[in-house]
Amino acid sequence: MNEFLTTWHEAAVTSAGLFWMALWAFGLGYLISSMIQVFVTRERMKQTMGGEGPKPIALGTFFGFISSSCSFAALATTRSLFAKGAGFVASLAFLLASTNLVIELGIIIAVFLGWQFVVGEYVGGILLILFTWMIVRLTGAFGLAEKARERAREAEGSQEEGEVPNWKKLIQSREGWRKVSHRYVMEWGMVWKDVTVGFTVAGIIAAFVPRAFFETLFIGSGSDDPAFWQVLAQTIVGPLAAFFTFIGSMGNIPLAAVLFSNGVAFAGIMAFIFSDLIVLPVLRIQAKFYGWPMALYIMGVFLIALVGTALVLHYALSAMGLLPDPSGVQAVTDREFFKVDYTLFLNLAFLALSGVFLWWKGVTAGFGNPVGEGATEKILFVLAVIAYLWLAGGLVIAPMLAG
């Protein structure tokens, strides 16, 4: 019993410590993302993404980058673009870019995994789009695109776009920064459940799951030079694991760090990170927007593209001698999380900023429904509440009982 209580405490401390390490990075990423979304003019976005050539796809990628958001918000925006005339591949490029070429995601990856994974995230995001374009051209989307567009138009309905103010005037105005504060709080509102569950699961796995489990699940993990078929197997297992976690990309990063510290190959980690758009809730939403045939087609295209991308990145870095070595990575549970260093001061600064923005949002617009709409959000809310109870028990009750 004491052993369980001690491990429970270790899991809770690890979860809290991982989040403490990442707090300033979340704040910085969401601040930059909020400023871009408020101040960058996007009124020509839909008009410039028609067609399937290089230009609309490049523009879809760029607009996705500046519109970076969580998977579920990106899905709704993509549906809107596709319904109003954007090309199919350009719409998919927007979706992939808005969830993978994400500033805050790159910062979190740098904190937990290192620069090779940051390069993999951004270069891989471009490769994902190129592979997707190639697969769609080869298959012709099996003639599903126009029927899916009609269904998306029905789901979209008639929505009028508001006029977008001049960004130069907006950035100098109180109203502009009020909108930034609103967007900043909304960004946190979209991901807090995923982040809570993700960091809690990461701590539990790091403390309770033995290394032998990962070596069994991810074939060849821990090997200094895994064979190609072993690396390929890991790139397939990664998305399968992500499919059933229900955790978004931001919540998956600490879990990816746990996997990497347990010897999972670079390709397997990248495939796991790239899998935020092939999880079960996303598949259900795509089916609602476009119908099941198109939803399954998009999922298949993304799966093939991300496996190919992960393998290309892995062997490109290997050829250059830059592949990160998991054997030298400190176990997550052995880290010293809470100390007086730059993390402490950056966290205090962003906690203060978040407090100001939260107050400003509250007094000017209120907070809305913290649970969110839809069955998936309600399930995540319940899981988040359970996670908080688990963390509170592990941090407070477990060490008292063990003592």
Image (cartoon, helix red, strand yellow):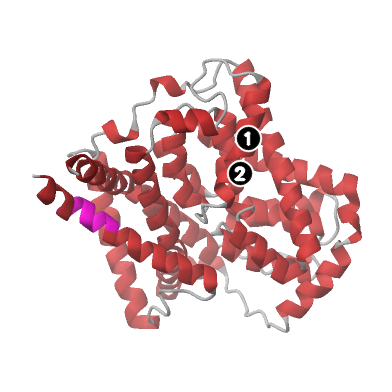
Q: Secondary structure at mark 2?
A: helix
Q: Mark 2: which amino acid?
A: Pro
Whether pointer 2 and pointer 1 mark residues with C-beta atoms closer than 8 Å, the reply is: yes
Q: Is residue 337 left or right of residue 178?
A: left
Q: Looking at the figure, which quarter contains the C terminus?
A: top left
Residue in the picture at 32% in, 81% down? 363
Determine which residue is flagged by label 2: 239
* Residue 80 is at least partly visible in this image: no
> Whole-Å distance between the Cαs marked 2 and 1?
7 Å
Residue 269 - label: none
The quadrant where residue 320 appears: top right
What secondary structure prevails in the magenta region?
helix
Determine which residue is flagged by label 1: 235
Q: Residues within 10 Å of mark 2 (few under 14, many from 20)?
A: many
- Residue 311 is situated, as x and y percent measured from the top left of the image, at 67, 30
Residue 148 higher or lower than 197, as above or below: below
Q: Looking at the figure, which quarter contains the N terminus?
A: top left
- Provide the residue span drawn in magenta: 390-396
Q: Front-most of 44 and 325?
A: 325
- Residue 367 is situated, as x and y percent measured from the top left of the image, at 38, 78
Magenta includes 225?
no
Q: Secondary structure at mark 1?
A: helix
Q: Mark 1: which amino acid?
A: Thr
Residue in the picture at 42% in, 80% down? 368
Residue 93 higher or lower than 224, as above or below: below
